[in-house]
Image (cartoon, grey):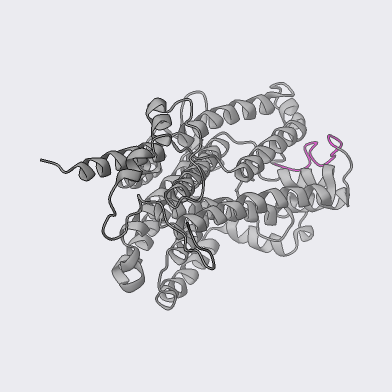
Amino acid sequence: MARPYDSALHDSAARQATRLEAIQGRFDPWLCGAAIALAVLGVVMVGSSSIAVAEELEVGPFYFLVRHLMFLGLGAVLCALVMRTELKSIEKYDRLLLLGCFGLLLLVFIPGLGHSVNGAQRWINLGVSNFQVVEAVKLMYIVWLASYLVRFRDEVNATWGAMLKPIFVACGLMVLLVFQPDFGSLALMLAITAGMLVLGGVHLPRMAAPVVIGLPLLAIVAIAEPYRMRRLTSFMDPFADPFNSGYQLANALMAVGRGELTGVGLGASIQKLNYLPEAHTDFILAVIAEELGFLGVCLVIGLYALLVGRALWVGLKCVEMRRHFAGYCAFGVALAISLQSLVSIGVNLGLLPTKGLTLPLISSGGSSVMMTCVAVGLLLRVSYELDRAQRQVARLRGEAPAPAPSTHDPAPARAAAAAHAPAADAAMPPAYGTSRLRQRVEPTFGRTTA
């Protein structure tokens, strides 16, 4: 026969659990605001920079703008789905996601399904559009690596095998990227792997060995193809051959120079009029620099700094609360967006050799836009679960009142009743030890109670 205070303790714990379940989180407003601002700026600049290209192709002046809006809308739907998916549901499919990475990269080599553009076999034909599979692979790989670092967190810092396993996986993916070829995505995947291993607590002196071996191999791959070597040499002095190897970079630099401080005005760019190749994709920042000037470029860089900085902050808070999978996912997405935007900005400003990387959320491109939206959705989900966990901890410590239950709470009546039922808690006898379910009693100094 159960004792009365045992039953009261069980009922109190059930009520407390119900109150915790009623607590909802919120999506980080800074992440959401920065992503929306970049997407809106991208819509404006794609519309401005693609008119001349569309008219030359005789597809209508707003063809690329409509296409961009369509993919942005699909990306928003995918973003919303990811935002409503629990991270634990994503984590349990980590191994399937890794297999999917290799499967997607192999699909491009299947005749009839793979699609080649300018000699590069990077796309699969979906009928209505082509999809660049590496955009999905990057995000799937980040989720798998985050899960791996959680499962082998101690071993990664202590043993060679645990540290080298993700490096070997990354090398396998890079081999497939070499055959496409896609050197830009290859280097990006390698940088993401190294960055996440460092943030995951890998032993840095042990990490130096793969870096020393890998950098010369990466340099060999970079100069193995003649067109990559031409890009490197033209990067040093694009105006030495402005009508051939240095044509893209020379026109990009002229666009940046014309913009000066405040730009020539929205829509008034001259370089986008069939002088600057890929003005609406790879070199859209040059058009931004020409039309909006130095201030426009600073705005773009500031928005990326806000998005990436906030993502890193959210990841750090997750790790501090021992929510390592969520934290590593935030770190990985932040690294991917920051490195890709850094390379794209550097290419447009003549600071890096030309690479086929778009500006996330701004450049026109179906697969890039959609998968960046999915990555932002993952970041927002991480921020939601972090805020929910912080509110639950605050409630357990008695530092904040429980908020009103949300409209989609399955048991609002029980939660409301539990919040107004302190009688059973007061009748409970003192419990031995400590419990997170009991409200913490703060000590008082210099005061007496009646």
Question: Which of the pair 407/2 is nearer the observer?
Answer: 2
- Kindly identify the residue that appears in the image at 75 percent across and 58 percent down: 238
Image coordinates for residue 426, horizontal then vertical, percent: 35, 45
- Kindly identify the residue that appears in the image at 69 percent across and 39 percent down: 37
Would you say residue 116 sits in the magenta stretch?
no
- Kindly identify the residue that appears in the image at 61 percent across and 40 percent down: 32
- Give residue 43's quadrant in the image: top right
Asked if residue 168 lies left or right of residue 198, the reply is left
Question: Which of the pair 223/296 is nearer the observer?
Answer: 296
In the picture, which quadrant includes the N terminus?
Answer: top left
What main secondary structure does the magenta stretch of the protein show? loop
Image coordinates for residue 110, horizontal then vertical, percent: 37, 36
Residue stretch rendered in magenta on the structure: 266-277
Vertical arrangement, residue 404 with respect to residue 307, above or below: above
Image coordinates for residue 161, horizontal then vertical, percent: 29, 68
View extreme (front): residue = 450
* Residue 96 in sight from this viewpoint: no
Question: Which of the pair 425/56 is nearer the observer?
Answer: 425
* Residue 327 in sight from this viewpoint: yes
Image coordinates for residue 108, horizontal then vertical, percent: 42, 39
